[in-house]
């Protein structure tokens, strides 16, 4: 038998259960509605961000039209090709790059930064390292305000690139490239389902950055070898292509320059080529090819390369001798002379025979 106290507890328990059962659907419904509102709010924010990003991509950098550049060439142009700077620790400088769209349509451009280094392969003057960090890394010191932007056809964007060095930067060189590539953002007629070919990336183009931090940086380089490219001794005719191999063993890039002089077997100068400066990155080899051409060459020649190391006014010299023997014209001349001589000899033999008879 339940006492009055027990009956009271049972009554209260049943009443609570009834109340909980009656309000549970409303709570679940409210949570669902709240979740739907939250999802809708997030989707609206995403849609807003997408539309705002598309608009903002169009005018992130100052742009200008290119006079007389309305032709559709299917490419884009990045300039300048190389930037050579000297910055002290703690110094900041802004360099302007330009990107010109000649693809015939509005395109989306992407900016990336990669470190670079030299190479001991004479066929490769510079190597970009992708995501890897180089021994002379500039990644942490070079930045742009926007890495993605849109550009209409025949428009040129002016992009400020900021180079900022820390106060504790050590003397030496920093090397890398600011690269630009582009993808399509609008579907063309004939694309399947009107899909935008996002994978249609045109080859990257970049600006090389050579940053020198002054101080007690080691400079060590010199002329390593000088020959003709084919390393032959005998040639039939010009042009003759020479190879100037320069080696940089220091920690900063060098810009050697100089001249090439060619003399004949009588020690007379018959050729001269001025060599403008070219760059050689640290711990690398760089082969420069120089062509020399002249008509009516015959005999032995000696070419001498005089190369200034670009520091301490040190000049290296190496020479290479070769022969130019145009055997085809010589053979033709010999054949003609032989025929003429044989004809004359035959003629006089016949003339003497007729006179004796």
Image (spheres, helix red, strand yellow):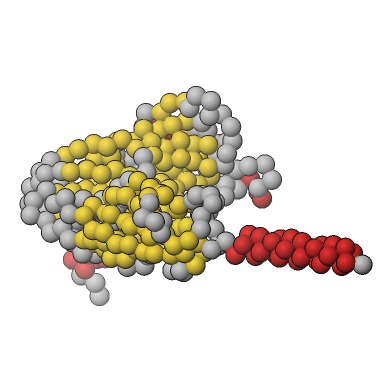
The image shows residue 251, relative to residue 36, as above or below, that is below
Taking depth in this image into account, of 29 and 70 the one nearest to the observer is 70
Where is residue 121? Give x, y as percent. Answer: 36, 67
| Residue drawn at point x = 52 percent, y = 33 percent | 153
User: Which image quarter is the C terminus in?
Assistant: bottom right
Taking depth in this image into account, of 4 and 209 the one nearest to the observer is 209
Where is residue 307? Give x, y as percent. Answer: 27, 54
Q: Residue furthest right?
A: 357
What is the tally of numbered marks visible in this picture? 0
Horizontal side, residue 122 vs residue 165: left or right: right
Where is residue 305? Give x, y as percent. Answer: 32, 56
Where is residue 129? Give x, y as percent. Answer: 33, 61
Horizontal side, residue 190 vs residue 88: left or right: right
| Residue drawn at point x = 33 percent, y = 57 percent | 304
Q: Residue furthest front?
A: 356
Horizontal side, residue 304 vs residue 341: left or right: left
User: Which image quarter is the N terminus in?
Assistant: bottom left
| Residue drawn at point x = 63 percent, y = 59 percent | 329
| Residue drawn at point x = 23 percent, y = 58 percent | 316
Q: Which of the 4 image quadrants contains residue 10?
A: bottom left
Q: Is residue 119 visible?
A: no
Taking depth in this image into account, of 145 and 320 the one nearest to the observer is 320
Q: Is residue 351 visible?
A: yes
Q: Residue furthest bottom?
A: 1
Taking depth in this image into account, of 250 and 204 the one nearest to the observer is 250
């Amino acid at each position: 038998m339940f006492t009055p106290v027990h009956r009271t507890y049972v009554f209260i328990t049943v009443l609570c259960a009834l109340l909980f059962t009656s309000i549970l659907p409303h709570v679940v419904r409210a949570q669902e509605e709240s979740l739907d509102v939250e999802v809708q709010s997030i989707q609206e924010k995403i849609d807003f961000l997408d539309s705002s990003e598309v608009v903002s991509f169009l005018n992130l950098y100052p742009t200008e039209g290119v006079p007389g550049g309305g032709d559709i060439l299917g490419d884009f142009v990045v300039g300048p090709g190389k930037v050579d700077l000297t910055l002290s620790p703690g110094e900041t400088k802004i360099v302007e790059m330009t990107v010109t769209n000649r693809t015939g349509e509005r395109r989306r451009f992407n900016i990336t930064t990669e470190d670079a280094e030299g190479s001991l392969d004479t066929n490769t003057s510079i190597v970009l390292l992708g995501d890897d960090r180089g021994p002379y890394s500039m990644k942490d010191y070079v930045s742009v305000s926007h890495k993605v932007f849109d550009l209409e056809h025949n428009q040129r964007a002016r992009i400020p690139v900021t180079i900022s060095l820390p106060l504790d930067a050590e003397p030496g060189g920093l090397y890398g490239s600011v690269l630009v590539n582009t993808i399509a953002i609008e579907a063309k007629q004939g694309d399947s389902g009107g899909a935008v070919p996002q994978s249609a990336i045109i080859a990257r183009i970049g600006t090389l950055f050579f940053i020198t931090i002054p101080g007690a940086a080691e400079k060590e380089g010199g002329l390593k070898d000088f020959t003709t490219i084919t390393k032959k001794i005998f040639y039939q005719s010009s042009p003759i292509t020479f190879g100037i191999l320069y080696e940089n063993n220091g920690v900063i890039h060098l810009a050697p320059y100089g001249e090439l002089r060619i003399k004949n077997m009588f020690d007379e100068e018959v050729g001269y080529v001025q060599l403008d400066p070219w760059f050689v990155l640290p711990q690398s080899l760089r082969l420069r090819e120089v062509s020399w051409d002249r008509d009516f060459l015959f005999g032995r020649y000696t070419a001498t390369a005089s190369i200034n190391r670009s520091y301490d006014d040190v000049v290296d010299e190496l020479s290479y001798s070769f022969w130019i023997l145009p055997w085809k014209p010589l053979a033709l001349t010999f054949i003609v002379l032989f025929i003429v001589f044989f004809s004359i000899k035959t003629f006089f033999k016949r003339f003497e025979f007729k006179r004796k008879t």
